[in-house]
Amino acid sequence: MARTVILATGAEYRGLPIDNLASFNGAGVYYLATRMEAQICKGEDVVIVGGGNSAGQAAVFLADTARRVIMIVRSGGLAETMSRYLVRRIEDNPAIEVRTNCQVVALDGGTHLETLRCRNKTTGSETIETIRHLFVMTGAVPATRWLDHCVALDENGFIKTGPDLTPEDLDTAQWPLKRPPHLLETSLPGVFAIGDVRGGNIKRVASAVGEGSIAIAFVHQVLRE
């Protein structure tokens, strides 16, 4: 029986129902918008698929460096799925175009994405865009179903750790120690979570590696307790 455990089961990004989507992963299709991606698409047009806060934040961020940001939204608007302040920032930014009732239905290119086809769900009309950068911001599904309520999860199913654990979480879990959970420790003493499966993680390999190093230090501390 182990005294400590590190959970690093990851998460699966929600894709699009397009057969060749995976062939453009890292070659024009991205699932995060960081400074690295912003530099890659600097001065070019980009498309973002999604209508939630992550898509809105990506649109505002990329609009600082991209020539134009096109948001593809399946629903009739952003108000029901996005925070009001983000909606206002998008509406006030001339570099951002929002296309509602629309979806990406096909991708084309050689070794890198070159064009995509969009379909208007209301009219059925289709347009082809010359786009080299597509951001799929439709969320991720954490690999936590197997935990079966062993540790506290957030509303999206990601593992809560350290300061993100509320007093209610700890009461429910019957936290037995006088000390609070360590930075990456879950609601179960000695059990840590790192990488994409952890709530608040920025979903980058470098971040996961750093969290792993930090977790190991805490593991040694727990073993000395």
Image: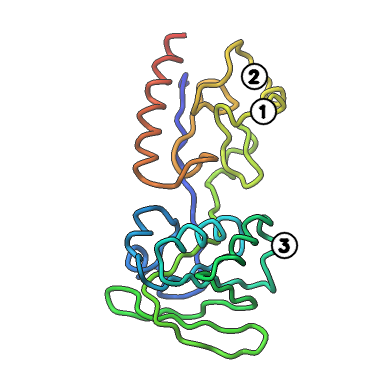
Determine whether the residue tagged by mark 1 lies in a helix, strand or loop.
loop
Q: Residues within 10 Å of mark 2 (few under 14, many from 20)?
A: some
C-alpha distance separating marks 1 and 3: 27 Å
Left or right: where does residue 217 sit relative to residue 55?
Answer: left
Q: Which residue is rendered at x = 55% and y = 52% of the image?
A: 141
* Residue 85 in the image: above or below residue 23: above
Left or right: where does residue 105 sit relative to residue 121?
Answer: left
Determine whether the residue tagged by mark 3 lies in a helix, strand or loop.
loop
Tally of numbered discs:
3
Q: Quadrant of residue 25?
A: bottom left
Q: Which residue is mark 1?
A: 166
Q: Are marks 3 and 2 in contact (CB under 8 Å)?
A: no
* Residue 164 in the image: above or below residue 68: above
Q: Which residue is rendered at x = 50% and y = 42% of the image?
A: 197
Q: Which residue is mark 3?
A: 80
Q: Looking at the picture, how far across and down is residue 114, in whole percent?
A: 35, 79
For the residue pair 207 and 212, the one nearer the viewer reads as 207
Q: Looking at the picture, how far across and down is residue 191, in whole percent?
A: 51, 26
Q: From the viewer's perspective, is the residue at label 1 or at label 2 nearer? A: 1
Q: Looking at the picture, how far across and down is residue 41, in whole percent?
A: 35, 66
Q: Quadrant of residue 55?
A: bottom right
The label shown at residue 175 is: 2
C-alpha distance separating marks 3 and 2: 37 Å
